Image (tube, rainbow, N blue to C red):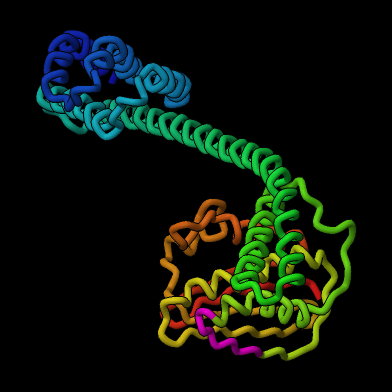
Amino acid sequence: MIPLRNDILSCLEEYKEEFFSIWEKQTLISEEDSFNDFIFLNGETLYDLIQKSLSSPIEELDILLEPYAQQVIGARNFGNLNMGEFVYNVNIGKTIICKELLHSYSKIDDLQPFIDKIYYVFDKFLYYSVTHYSNIKDQIIEEKNEYITSTHHERLTLLGQMTSSFVHEFRNPLTSIHGFVQLLRSENPQLPYMDIIANELEQLKFSISQFLMLSKKEIVELEMTTFSLNDLIEEVLSFLYPRILEVNVDIQKNYLHELSILGFKDAIRQVLINIIFNAVDVLKDIEHPVMQIELDTTSDSVILDIANNGPRIPEGLLDNIFEPFVSTKEAGTGLGLYVSKNTIEKHGGTLTCQSNDDWTVFTIILPL
């Protein structure tokens, strides 16, 4: 086959200029891309590799093809590169060369080994090109994700610093106002609206606590204590009773056990207030609002379900409901559930949410 190989090499050499002319006319080129650069700057190298393939072993071709493909892809403008067009145009080149050889030689059986070699060069070049392209794309995406994550964490850190500074300054006059309201209530019990003012101040104090917990600067208690979860739930319901009464929520309780847990009581109280208050808030437009609170246990865990028959949380929102700044309420900060989940996880537990057309259920699981 040596004479035939030499004959084919001569044919390819003579056909080279015509090949590039035909190839350029049949390529697909986007306006923002320039495949001409590939044809004239890199195409000759690929054509030389095709000629070389006719007398070289596969292993030697692989050593040459991989760095060449990486060089071609690395030199392209990734913002404008259309990989679909790239693959199509390379395959068009393969078709043009093989058609010319099949047209020039009638003995296809003798020609087949050389056609196979040419196919191998084109196919392996595409394989290395697409692989390198995918690796670079994955690296770019990973770097962007790392940047987004880093920026997000920086924003949260900055938010924590800002809110911690602001809230500490804000809490001092608020404490004074709260004290004077209590004094006015004791000295003038007949004074109207004092209960409403006091309740609103309490709500504001708890909102401030959310920001302090988010800033991670505030230590709620010096050490964990053991406390009754049943009593804490009743305490929170009593605290929120004016709002519960206003919405006319039917509270259905099912405490299957009397349970105590070890933890930061104030932090767990804040979690319960966040979840129950949110539930009451979404029930304000329901004809027969119901909230079910069930407390159960396993061999090593406490399970607290807080369910309401309010509107279903959309699936897309449900997936991100514990993320910061995500809220179902127009005026919500989106921090309450984020803080609550972090608090429960710091206690070694989990906080999850399920929602359908009948019920929305928040489930807290804590170590017993």
What's the residue at 14%, 27% (across, down)? 99
- Indicate the position of residue 121 as horizontal and vertical percent values: 34, 26
User: What is the count of numbered marks?
Assistant: 0
Range of residues picked out in magenta:
246-253
In the image shown, does 14 or 326 lie closer to the viewer?
326
| Res. 118 image quadrant | top left
Residue at image position (50%, 79%) is 247
Quarter of the N terminus within the rendering = top left
Residue 209 quadrant: bottom right
User: In the picture shown, does residue 215 fall above or below 227?
Assistant: above
Image side of residue 252 versus residue 358, left or right: right
Q: Where is residue 89 in the image (x, y as percent from the top left)?
A: 22, 27
- The residue depicted at 76 percent of the width and 45 percent of the height is 217
| In the displayed structure image, the side of residue 53 where residue 40 appears, left or right | left
Which quarter of the figure is the C terminus placed in? bottom right
Foreground: 226 or 42?
A: 226
Q: Does the magenta stretch include residue 166?
A: no
Q: Say if residue 113 shows up in the picture.
A: no
Q: Is 248 one of the magenta-colored residues?
A: yes
Residue 250, compared with residue 172, is above or below; it is below
Locate residue 334 relative to residue 20 in the image: left or right. right
Residue sitting nearer the eye, 329 or 176: 176
Vertical side of 174 occupied by 162: above or below: above
Residue shown at the point (46%, 62%) measured from the top left: 328
Residue 192: horizontal and vertical position, in percent?
A: 60, 73
The picture places residue 14, in percent across and down from the top left corner, at: 16, 8
Q: In this view, does 121 lie to the left or right of 112?
A: right
Q: Is residue 335 visible?
A: yes
